[in-house]
Image (spheres, coloured by chain):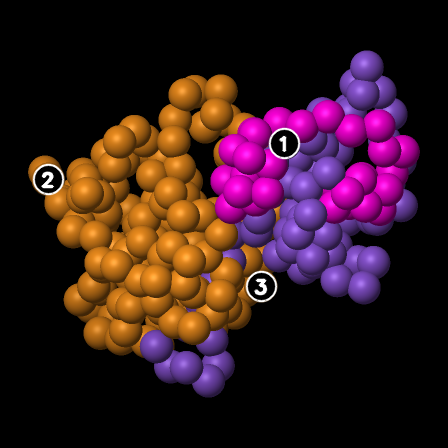
Chain colours: A purple, B orange
């Protein structure tokens, strides 16, 4: 058994269209590195300087890692990790659009 | 491609936007093949008049509920309380859902809210017709 990782639509271009991949990573940082190794380009999309990007939500099973140990959140066999882009936007301060 | 929604659902979206004014409101339009079957009013975790971020835990819960019900993410709505109904630079930067129609509601004229639909793919904006039926 391993950890299941759900890949969101905009990142499936890195996984050749795969919606779910498997990983043996022991925590979120390891997972990001492993994804980068197998699917180059993922790390930059997910993180910046070792931190998960603000508009990337990562859940272990049902829990947001922000409420767990963030990037250090431990993973174990049978866990499901969901990578879900935030739904965000807005008029912004400068554009007025 | 058209976004199809019931007049009463659009009215409910307008009411949600009005209630959150002057802050931006946001929500999810779930359904199938461009037809909205259910609207989810979401919490703007930023509580800001110029920015929205859906509460991440709520977003996860709703997306899971939709997946289990066999529903698709047909659209994402949000209000521009002081701007026109067109994607801003921020909207384009943060458009991570190429499959969804971004429904933007302008409250520039608060009594006459205006809604327009767009797809935002690879930073390209294209307008989508919004078909409202009663």
Using the image, name the chain to which the residue with label 2 belongs: B
Circles 1 and 3: CB distance less than 8 Å? no
Location of residue A17 in the rendering, given as x and y in whole percent from the top left corner: 52, 33
Location of residue B58 in the rendering, given as x and y in whole percent from the top left corner: 57, 41
Location of residue B120 in the rendering, given as x and y in whole percent from the top left corner: 36, 57
As drawn, the residue found furthest toward the bottom would be: A94
Dot label at residue B105: none
Q: Which residue corresponds to mark 3?
A: B46
Q: Earlier in the sequence, mark 2 or mark 3?
A: 3
Residues drawn in magenta: A8-37
Location of residue A95 in the rendering, given as x and y in whole percent from the top left corner: 41, 82
**What is the spatial separation of the Cα atoms under label 2 and label 3, in whole angstroms?**
33 Å
At x 83%, y 58%, the residue is A50
Report if residue B122 lies within the magenta region.
no
Dot label at residue A6: 1
**What is the spatial separation of the Cα atoms under label 1 and label 3, in whole angstroms?**
26 Å
Using the image, name the chain to which the residue with label 1 belongs: A
Same-chain check, marks 2 and 3? yes
Circles 2 and 3: CB distance less than 8 Å? no
In the image, is residue A20 above or below residue A55?
Answer: above
Using the image, name the chain to which the residue with label 3 belongs: B
In the image, is residue B82 above or below residue A55?
Answer: below
> Element at badge 1?
strand
Q: Which residue corresponds to mark 2?
A: B133
Classify residue B112 by image quadrant. bottom left
In the image, is residue B47 above or below residue B61?
Answer: below
């Amino acid at each position: 058994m391993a950890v299941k990782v759900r890949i969101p639509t905009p990142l499936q271009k890195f996984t050749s269209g795969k919606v779910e991949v498997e990983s043996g990573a022991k925590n979120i940082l390891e997972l990001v590195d492993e994804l980068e190794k197998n699917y180059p380009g993922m790390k930059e999309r997910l993180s910046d300087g070792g931190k998960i990007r603000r508009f990337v939500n990562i859940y272990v099973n049902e829990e947001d890692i922000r409420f767990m140990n963030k990037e250090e959140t431990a993973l174990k066999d049978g866990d499901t990790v969901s990578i879900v882009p935030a739904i965000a936007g807005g008029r912004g301060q400068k554009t007025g659009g | 491609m058209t976004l199809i929604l019931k007049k009463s659902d659009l009215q409910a979206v307008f009411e949600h936007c009005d209630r959150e004014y002057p802050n931006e409101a946001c929500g999810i339009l779930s359904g199938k093949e461009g037809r909205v079957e259910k609207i989810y009013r979401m919490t703007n975790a930023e509580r800001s008049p110029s920015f929205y971020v859906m509460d991440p835990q709520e977003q996860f819960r709703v997306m899971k509920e939709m997946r289990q019900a066999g529903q698709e993410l047909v659209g994402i709505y949000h209000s521009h309380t002081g701007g026109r109904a067109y994607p801003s630079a921020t909207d384009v930067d943060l458009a991570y859902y190429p499959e969804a129609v971004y429904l933007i509601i302008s409250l520039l004229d608060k009594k006459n809210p205006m809604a327009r639909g767009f797809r935002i793919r690879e930073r390209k904006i294209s307008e989508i017709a919004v078909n409202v039926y009663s």
